[in-house]
Image (cartoon, grey):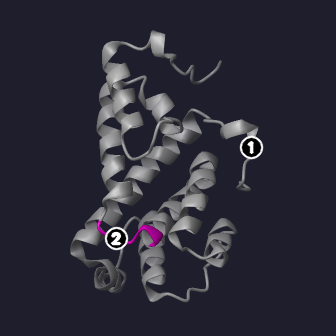
Amino acid sequence: MERLSPLTDDQMNERQQAILEDIRSGPRGPSAHGPFLAWLQSPDLADRAQKLGEYLRFEAQMDKRLAELAILTVARKWTAQFEWYAHKKFAISAGLSENVIDSIEQRKQPNFVNEDEKAIYNFSMALQESYAVDDVTFNEAVRHIGRTGVTDLVGLLGYYTLVSMTLNVYQIPLPNSEPPPLDP
């Protein structure tokens, strides 16, 4: 059984069409793919999730390089192929080194040059592996991105976990039949 039958514009009700237009007219641009294909099956979820994601991706209180680093840790944890495919490019554009990206891909501790990256990586990994962070890890993240940034970081990790779950459950394919970039 096919897990997801993407809705065509004429199959969508008015609410779904309005949400799709909101997504397309926002900072993500005219294409709405990835988890949105699944979320549109539940328009209220799609609306709320895309707004949260828009804030976290484009307005969160941390450098884009650090946000993309955190997103890649989630993509790797879940082996979310579409998420990794998309955000590896964003991470490189934001200034994250390919050495750090390659280490995350290989599930190895990166050799960080930048202390802020190390703090965000340690926080992200601790939360995903032990479901908590100790005081040292928390305080180090606060030192680099502030309390608001840490709150946004927790939200970012949670949101991209939802994205990863959605992508994996619905087996969202990569664009242009690209091969999966991550080994299981």
Residue 118 location, x and y as percent? Answer: 48, 82
Q: Secondary structure at mark 2?
A: loop
The residue tagged 2 is: 62
Query: Of label 1 and label 2, which has the lower sequence position?
Result: 2
Q: Nearer the viewer, residue 140 or 55?
A: 55
In this rendering, would 87 be left or right of 10? right
Task: Return the residue found at the far top.
Answer: 10
Residue 139 location, x and y as percent? Answer: 29, 84
Q: Residue at x 22, y 74 (%)?
A: 147
Residue 74, numbered circle: none
Q: Residue at x 54, y 60 (%)?
A: 90
The residue tagged 1 is: 178
Q: CA distance from mark 1 to mark 2?
A: 31 Å
In this rendering, would 64 be left or right of 56? right
Q: Compared to 48, does 152 lie above or below?
A: below
Identity, as a three-letter code, of the amino acid under mark 2: Met
Check the picture and name the quadrant holding the C terminus.
Answer: bottom right
Residue 96 location, x and y as percent? Answer: 55, 74
Identity, as a three-letter code, of the amino acid under mark 1: Glu
Q: Residue at x 45, y 88 (%)?
A: 115
165 within the magenta span = no
Q: Which residues are magenta?
A: 61-65
Asked where in the image residue 112 lies, by quadrant, the reply is bottom right
